[in-house]
Image (cartoon, helix red, strand yellow):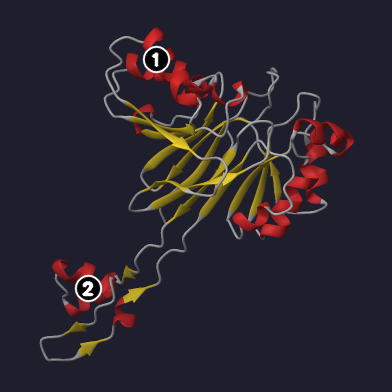
Amino acid sequence: MEPFKVHILGCGSALPTLRHYASSQVVEVRDKVLMLDCAEGTQMQLRRCHVRFTKLSHVFITHLHGDHCFGLIGMISTFGLLGRTATLHIHAPEELEQMLQSQIEFFTHDLGYGIEFHPVDTTHKTVVYEDRSIIVESIPLQHRMPTCGYLIREKQGLPHIRREMIDFYKIPTSQINNIKNGADWTTDDGEVIPNSRLVKSADTARSYAYCSDTKYIPTLHEMIKGVNTLYHESTYGEDYILQAEKYHHSTARQAAMVARDAGVGKLLLGHYSSRYEDENVLLNEAKEVFENSFLTSEMDVFDV
């Protein structure tokens, strides 16, 4: 099965601490490397997680609070110094485009590669990127400014052809794709070998939803129904629910309610308030509602 992994680069909230970096993740899916948010310090964390800079192709920004995008211009500049030539695609609310272009013009010279900006409508669930193997959709969220999450899905692959059948029936390589697409095989003696004997089921397509930052949305589960892994902000515990409501954030318990109602495989908690020296209080609150909940921490890697 092809890799589908989430690398946690930062899982803190707006106030920097010595324990957590602000929001950023790297997702390895199939042969691609995608980034979700790019806070201050992201490029240093990217080095630590040993993901090759050259493989990063797309950056998806949820909203324009600094703890989600202050690291972008620094990373772009460093890529230029390292001799990058491949275009870097930035997907973000449209307000970022002009500001980012001004920073690029002021702080970088002869960057050496292209930056392609793709504005994202944060008000509707829409496809923001698609290729032959994955699709990325925006997820409208409710925060103090235009914000969206992102849903990364694999496309359903073709069945696997059985190696022993290729050898037994001496099926030429030129016919393998036809069989994967449903064709039977006819032997030299005229015997028809049904497709069901030649192939085994394709790997089940996997999905990952990234929801940070947002207030609790009772209907959010409808847009992420059945995803394998959900990252949902859990800035506060129930002891600070009034602050969560005031600043349009969620509690760990509310994140677990979304996971439970969506029927997800596992829940990743993050975007912790600096108030908490020990985030296990958040984990315990989440587990009361959704048992398969996990704390995230820098350099953690989760299989989707």
Q: Which residue is mark 1?
A: 104
Sequence-first disc among 2 and 1: 1
Asked if one can make out residue 4 in the rendered structure from this viewpoint, the answer is: yes
Residue 229: percent from left, percent from top: 59, 51
Mark 1 neighbour density, 10 Å: few (under 14) some (14–19) many (20 or more): some
At x 83%, y 31%, the residue is 243
Q: Secondary structure at mark 1?
A: helix
Please state which amino acid type lies under the numbered disc 1: Ile
At x 80%, y 30%, the residue is 278
Rendered-image quadrant of the N terminus: bottom left
Q: Using the image, determine if residue 104 lies above or below residue 215.
A: above
Q: Quadrant of residue 88?
A: top left
Name the foreground residue: 138 vs 146: 146
Question: Does residue 286 appear left or right of residue 64 in this picture?
Answer: right
Asked if one can make out residue 224 in the rendered structure from this viewpoint, the answer is: no
Q: Which of pointers 2 and 1 indicates the residue nearer the eye?
A: 1
Residue 56: percent from left, percent from top: 39, 33
Mark 2 neighbour density, 10 Å: few (under 14) some (14–19) many (20 or more): some
Tell me the distance, in whole angstroms, between the alpha carbons under discs 2 and 1. Answer: 54 Å
Residue 54: percent from left, percent from top: 34, 29
Please state which amino acid type lies under the numbered disc 2: Ile
Extreme residue in the right direction: 239
At x 87%, y 34%, the residue is 242
At x 62%, y 48%, the residue is 230
Q: Secondary structure at mark 2?
A: helix
Circle number at residue 166: 2
Q: Using the image, determine if residue 13 lies above or below residue 291.
A: above
